Image: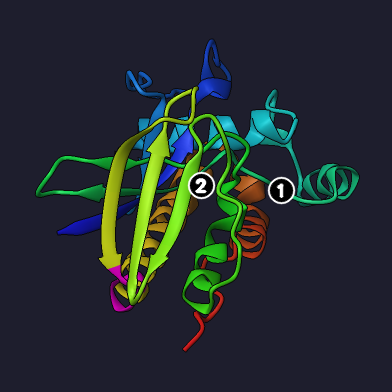
C-alpha cells in the first residue's frame, strides 16, 4: 500500500532558540499532521519563520501589521518540503527533492493530466506514466535509479486528499501553538499559512 506524508525540511531549525522545538530526526524531515507534539509544531514554525526571514524575537509582541509588512517584502511565504510517498509493503520511499517547496504540493494534481511537473533535485525524482500507472523513481547523485514506487492514477486522488487532511490537522495545531507563543499573531498567522500553502482551498474534482 502506498501512503503519503506531508514533510518539512528542518535544516533551518538547527540552533534555533526563540521557542521550544523538538530534536530533528536523522533524515531532517518532519511530518506535518494533527498528531504532532507542541515541540514538533514549534520546529515547523521555526523553519517557516527562519526560511522566510520573519523576526522571531520578541515574537510575542509581533503584530499582524508587522507580519503583513514582512510578507509583503518577501512577496510570498514558502516552506522547504513537499510530499513523501512510501510503499508500506516494500519499504521504498520517495522524498521531495531539494528546492521543491511545500507551497507547490498541489502541483501533483497535474500529473494525471500528463503535464510535466518539476519535483525538485538532489535527489531527483523521475516520474513516468505507464498506462494508468504512475511510477516514481528516485536517483542518487549520479542519477542512478535506486528507488521505485508505483500506484494507479485513481490512487493519487486518495493520496492528495490525505495530504490535505494532514495539512488541515497541522493548521489546527498551529492555532493552539500560536495562542501560547504569539497570541497577537494567531488569526493572521493561520490565515497566511492557509492562503500561501493552499491548505483548505477546495480540491479539484
Q: Report the side of 59 relative to 205 (left or right).
A: right
Residue drawn 37% across the image and 30% down it: 39
Viewer-proximal residue among 162 and 151: 151
CA neighbours of label 2 inside 10 A, class few (<14), some (14 to 19), many (20+): some
Q: Quadrant of residue 51?
A: top right
13 is higher (above) or lower (below) than 152: above
- Pointer 1 with pointer 2, Cβ within 8 A: no
31 is higher (above) or lower (below) than 200: above
Residue drawn 38% across the image and 21% down it: 24
Magenta segment, which residues?
A: 152-156
Q: Can residue 129 be seen in this snapshot?
A: yes
Chief secondary structure of the magenta portion: helix
Q: Position of residue 38 (x, y in %)?
A: 36, 37
Residue sitting at the far top: 15
Q: Position of residue 133 (x, y in %)?
A: 32, 70
The colour scheme used here is rainbow
Q: Position of residue 163 (x, y in %)?
A: 38, 61
Amino acid at each position: 500500500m502506498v501512503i503519503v506524508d506531508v514533510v518539512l525540511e528542518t535544516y533551518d531549525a538547527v540552533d534555533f532558540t526563540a521557542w521550544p522545538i523538538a530534536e530533528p530526526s536523522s533524515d531532517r524531515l518532519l511530518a506535518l499532521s494533527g498528531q504532532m507534539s507542541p515541540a514538533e509544531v514549534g520546529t515547523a514554525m521555526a523553519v517557516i519563520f527562519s526560511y522566510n526571514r520573519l523576526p522571531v524575537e520578541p515574537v510575542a509582541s509581533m503584530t499582524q501589521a508587522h507580519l503583513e509588512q514582512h510578507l509583503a517584502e518577501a512577496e510570498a511565504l514558502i516552506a522547504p518540503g513537499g510530499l513523501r510517498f512510501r510503499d508500506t509493503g516494500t519499504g521504498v520511499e520517495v522524498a521531495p527533492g531539494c528546492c521543491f517547496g511545500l507551497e507547490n504540493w498541489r502541483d501533483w494534481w497535474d500529473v494525471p493530466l500528463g503535464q510535466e511537473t518539476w519535483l525538485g533535485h538532489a535527489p531527483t525524482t523521475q516520474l513516468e506514466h505507464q498506462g494508468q500507472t504512475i511510477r516514481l523513481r528516485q536517483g542518487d547523485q549520479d542519477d542512478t535509479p535506486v528507488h521505485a514506487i508505483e500506484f494507479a492514477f485513481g490512487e493519487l486522488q486518495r493520496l492528495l486528499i490525505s495530504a490535505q487532511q494532514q495539512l488541515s490537522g497541522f493548521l489546527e495545531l498551529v492555532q493552539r501553538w500560536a495562542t501560547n507563543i504569539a497570541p497577537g499573531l494567531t488569526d493572521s498567522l493561520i490565515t497566511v499559512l492557509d492562503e500561501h500553502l493552499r491548505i483548505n482551498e477546495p480540491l479539484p474534482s
